[in-house]
Image (cartoon, rainbow, N blue to C red):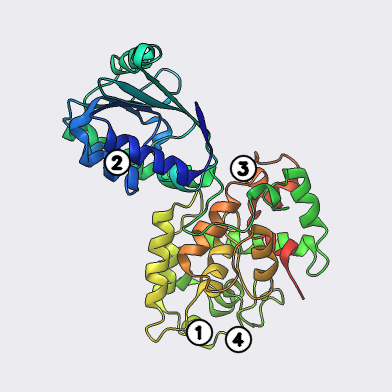
Amino acid sequence: MQLITQNEELVKTLSRLITTYPKSAFAVAWATSGNTIFSLLKKHVPKITQAVIGTHFYQTHPDVLDTFKNSPRVHFILQPSGVFHPKIYIFWDKKRWEALIGSANLTTGALSTNSEAMVLLSGEGTDYSHGKDEILSLIDSYWSISKEINEDDATAYREIWSTKQSDLSRLSGQYGSRAAAKPPTESSVMSMSWAQYFKEVKSDSYHGFDHRCNLLEFVHRAFLNHPTFESMELTLRKTIAGLPNGLDERWGWFGSMKGAGYYHQAINNNNPYISKALDAIPLHGTVTREQYNNYIKDFIKAFPNGRHGVSIASRLLALKRPDQFICLDSKNRRKLCTDFGIPSSKMDYDRYWEEVIERIMDTPWWRSRRPIDSQEMQVWDGRAAMLDAIFYEE
C-alpha cells in the first residue's frame, strides 16, 4: 500500500497505470478535459471495460460528455439520488492489479492544485482476486444506474452547464476570471449582516446619512415622473449625472463627475444614447447581466471619441438603481477594492459587474428582506450605492 498526496506523484502514477495495463475501470464524481490524464485516457479508450462519471452540481465539463457520447465503455450519472461521489480507479492484467482509491476526481484541479489523498493498492499471485473483485463489483453497481450519453443529452447538458458557471464560481468565492487576494469571509463588508451594515452606513462622517437618503429618494421620484432621462430639464440631469448645477448642492454625492469633460458635454447636449442606455435599466426588479450589457453598449455610443469609463457609467447606474449599483470612483475605489481583495487598477465594465456587483449581490445584507422601519427601508432601497458612505475617502 502507498499513500499519494502530491499532485505530481498522482499524475505520474496514473500515467504509468494507464499505459502499462491492458484493462481498466473507474468511477469518479466529476471529470474535466484539458489535462494530461484525460488526454491519455482518450488514447487508451479500448482498455476501458467500464467507466462511470457523475455530473452533480455541473462540475463535469461538457467536453467530457462530447468525448464519450454514444460510448459503450463510458457512461454518466445525470440525476443521482443524493450525490454520486466515488473516486476509484483500477487497472489489471492476468497476473497483477493496482487500484487508486481516495479523494481525487478526474479533474484538472485534482491533478494540479487541489490537496488530495489517494491510496494505491495492489494484488498478485495467490492474492490476485482478493480486493480486485470487490472493486470491480462496486463499479459494476454504479454502471447499473448510469446511462450512455447521446448527442441530445450532451447538448442539453452543455446548455444548462453554461448557465450554471457564474453561480458555481461565486459559490467557490471566484468572481470573474481572476482570483481575489482573499476569500469573501475576510471582507468586512461581504460578511456583514443587515444590522451591521445599517449601523456602518448610518455613521457616515462626510455627507450626512439623512441627506444621502433624501437625495436618492428625490432622484427616484424624478425617474418615476419622467418618461426618459432626456425628457428631464438640464439641471435635473446634471444632478443625476453628478455634475455641478444650480438646482441641488448635493450633485457631487455618490461620485462627483465634474472633471469628466466629454461626459459633461454629452449631458449638456442631451446625448440620446445616454437616455437610451438608461432605458435598458428597469426601475424595479433585479437588473440582469444582459440588461447591464445593453446599457453599456448604448452608453459607449455617446462617446465616439472615447473618454467614457466605469466611473461615469456607474454614476448613472447608481442613481437610477442605487439598490444594485455603486458609483465606483476615485474616492471609494481604493478602500472598496482592498476590502474585496481585488486590484483597483484597470477596472473595466466586465470587472465592475463580475468582481464588484456580483460580490455585492452575494452579501447577507444585500440579500436581506426589506425592513419595516422607514429609515432602514430608505437605506435598503439604496443599499448598494450607500457603500460609498463606508468606503469614501476625503
Q: Earlier in the sequence, mark 1 or mark 4?
A: 4
356 or 314: nearer the viewer: 356
Q: Where is residue 88 drawn, in percent x and y?
A: 40, 26
Label 3: state its secondary structure.
helix
| Residue that mark 1 sits on | 268
Q: Real-space Cα distance between discs 4 and 2? A: 48 Å
Label 3 vs label 1, nearer the camera: 3
Residue at 52% in and 73% down: 346
Q: Earlier in the sequence, mark 4 or mark 2?
A: 2
Tag 4: amino acid: Gly
Residue 359 numbered tag: none
* Residues tagged 3 and 1 counted as in contact (Cβ below 8 A): no
Q: CA distance from mark 3 to mark 2?
A: 31 Å
| Residue pointed to by mark 4 | 259
**On screen, residue 12 above or below 319:** above
* Neighbourhood count class around disc 1 (C-alpha, 10 Å): few under 14, some 14–19, many 20 upward: some
Going from N to C along the chain, the mark reached first, 1 or 2, is: 2
Residue matched to label 3: 367
Q: Secondary structure at mark 1?
A: helix
| Mark 2, residue position | 62
Q: Residue at x 21, y 41 (%)?
A: 43
Q: Position of residue 42 (x, y in %)?
A: 23, 40
Among the two numbered marks 3 and 1 on one chain, the one whose residue lies closer to the N terminus = 1
Residue lying at 61% horizontally and 42% vertically, measured from the top left? 367
Under mark 2, the amino acid is Pro
Q: Secondary structure at mark 4?
A: loop
**How many marks on residues?**
4
Q: In the rendered view, does 377 fall on the left or right side of 96?
A: right
Q: What crowding class fits label 3: few (fewer than 14 Cα within 10 Å), some (14-19), or many (20 or more)?
A: few
* Classed neighbour count for the residue bearing mark 4: other residues with Cα under 10 Å, few (<14), some (14–19), many (≥20): few
